[in-house]
Amino acid sequence: MRNIGEIMKQAKALQSKMEGMQAELEALEVEGSGAITVVDASRVQFTSMDQADGSEPVCIIGLQVHILTAGATFNLHTREASPGTLLPRKD
């Protein structure tokens, strides 16, 4: 049987590794030559989608749309987009 000190040390190392992995998974960075579109409905204030049938237009207020190219990021936790590496360098 392992000693409790060794087990605690391993648990702390695992916790630290998991925190690092969670931080990496929070933000998505766009790669490649195209662009992606992020449609964020987390701040929608009103929608008529539940009232419209398939042929009627809908009203959506508060919908956010981000068009991101390589280097830009979107944080899944804070729901904020950033130009990331697209920011001009200050020399």
Image (cartoon, rainbow, N blue to C red):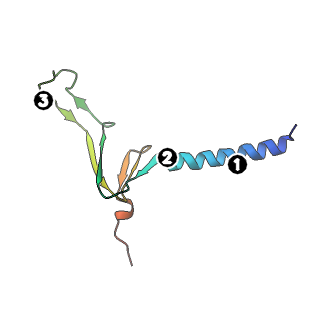
Among numbered discs 2 and 1, the one appearing first in the sequence: 1
Q: Residues within 10 Å of mark 2 (few under 14, many from 20)?
A: few
Return the residue at label 2: 25
Would residue 73 appear left or right of 60 to someone viewing this image?
right
The disc at residue 48 is none
Q: Are marks 2 and 1 in contact (CB under 8 Å)?
A: no
Return the residue at label 1: 13
Would residue 7 appear left or right of 75 to someone viewing this image?
right
Would residue 41 appear left or right of 54 to someone viewing this image?
right
Q: Residues within 10 Å of mark 1 (few under 14, many from 20)?
A: few
| Frontmost residue, 9 versus 47 | 9
Q: Secondary structure at mark 3?
A: loop
Asked where in the image residue 6 lies, by quadrant, the reply is top right
| Frontmost residue, 29 versus 60 | 29
Q: Are marks 2 and 3 in contact (CB under 8 Å)?
A: no
Quadrant of the drawing holding the N terminus: top right
Residue 83: x %, y % from top left: 34, 59
Indicate the amino acid at tag 1.
Ala
Q: Residue furthest bottom?
A: 91
The disc at residue 57 is 3
Residue at 18% from the left image edge and 20% from the top image edge: 51
Inter-mark Cα distance, 1 to 3: 54 Å
Q: Residue furthest front?
A: 33
Residue 84: x %, y % from top left: 38, 60
Indicate the amino acid at tag 2.
Leu
